[in-house]
Each structure stands twice: as structure tokens, then as C-alpha cells.
Image (tube, rainbow, N blue to C red):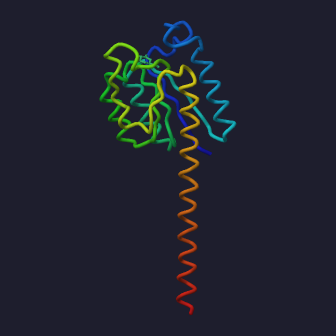
Amino acid sequence: MYTIWTLHGPNLNLLGIREPGHYGQSTLLEIDETLKNKANERGAALSTYQRNSESELIELIHQAYEHKVDAIIFNPAAFTHTSIALRDALLAVSIPFVEVHLSNIFAREPFRQHSYFSDIAMGVITGLGAESYYYALNTLINHLNHKQYTQSDLNLGEAASSQAKGAYNHA
Ligand code: DQA
């Protein structure tokens, strides 16, 4: 079973009351519950964390490595535009992640249009509200399934080729 973590950055605990014109009406609890249900339906285990401090998010990324987490859904919130330290943490652990944003960061103030994560993310989903998270989840599960199938194809390939070698050596 795959383990996926969702990390939410600062102020996302206020979803529901926070600037609904940008971030919608859903609360973080509603988004997290929906994510967990969708993950369960697809046979994955999902844990969610929200932190307002950069250092705690860094610690969580380190813990994700220790727990052998397969993939991360990450909304770095305002740290998107400032945090080299979080970028370095993700590079250090090499866990595939999708960067998500509820609002369309490219349709907002110029300072939001640069992200320290987009070039190292598997992909970026921005502007689709809570759906941004759900698309990210599906994409990551598809990616992990594909990787597993490819791996088992490779193993089968190796088994078949060593069988063939055995047959050849016999002859
Ligand atoms: C955000 C966009 C960021 O620019 C902002 O600082 C946030 C939320 C989003 O989900 O749209 O806190 O990441």
C-alpha cells in the first residue's frame, strides 16, 4: 500500500474563513477528509499535516524520508515564494511531490508568480480550488502504479532472460 503525505503551509488552517474569493469555502478539515477517502478508495494511505512554521515543515519532510513515504502533495502557501530551505529539504529526500495551490498564483500579484518548487516538482496544479489537491492525489497514485508495473515488467524481463540463458546453457 502506498503512503502519501499532504503538507499544508502557513495560514491554510484558516481555510473557509480566509479570503474565500481566492481560496474558496471548503475548510481544511473538509479537504483532508475528502483526500483521505479518495486515497482509501484507491488503496493508498494518506496522512495530512498543516504547519505555520517553516522549520516544522522541514522536520516533516525529513520524517517523510524516515517513514519511507512514497509521495507528497505539497501546498507550501506563502513559503512557495520565499523558501530555499524547504526546496533543499525536498531535494535532499528525493520524494516525488506535486505542488498545489488553491488560487491561480499566476493571476495574482507579481511576487506570487515565482515558486521555489515548480522546477523540482513532478508537476504543479494551481487555481482549481480544493480540486487542485484531488487531481494531485490521482496523478501521484497513477504515477506510483505505473512505476510498480514498470518495475514488475523489468523483473519479469530479467526472469525471462535468465530462463532463456539457462535454456541456452543447457543446450
Ligand atoms: C496559496 C497561494 C500562495 O501565494 C499563498 O501565500 C497561500 C496559498 C494557494 O493555495 O493558493 O497561502 O499557496
Residue 44 coordinates in the image, percent (x, y): 63, 40
For the point 57% across and 60% down, the residue is: 152
94 up-or-down from 26: above or below: below
111 up-or-down from 160: above or below: above
Q: Is residue 151 left or right of residue 104?
A: right
Residue 133 coordinates in the image, percent (x, y): 55, 27
48 up-or-down from 140: above or below: above
Q: Quadrant of residue 39?
A: top right
Q: Quadrant of residue 141?
A: top right
Q: Is residue 44 left or right of residue 110?
A: right
Spot the residue most to the right.
Answer: 41
Q: Is the N terminus in the top left, top right, bottom left or bottom right quadrant?
A: top right
Spot the residue most to the front.
Answer: 107
Q: Is the C terminus in the top left, top right, bottom left or bottom right quadrant?
A: bottom right
Q: How many marks?
A: 0
Residue 91 coordinates in the image, percent (x, y): 35, 40
Front in this rendered view, residue 47 or 63: 47
Front in this rendered view, residue 85 or 60: 85
Ligand 1 placement by image quarter: top left
Residue 122 coordinates in the image, percent (x, y): 44, 39
Front in this rendered view, residue 112 or 17: 112
Q: Is residue 67 left or right of residue 39?
A: left
For the point 50% across and 32% down, the residue is: 73
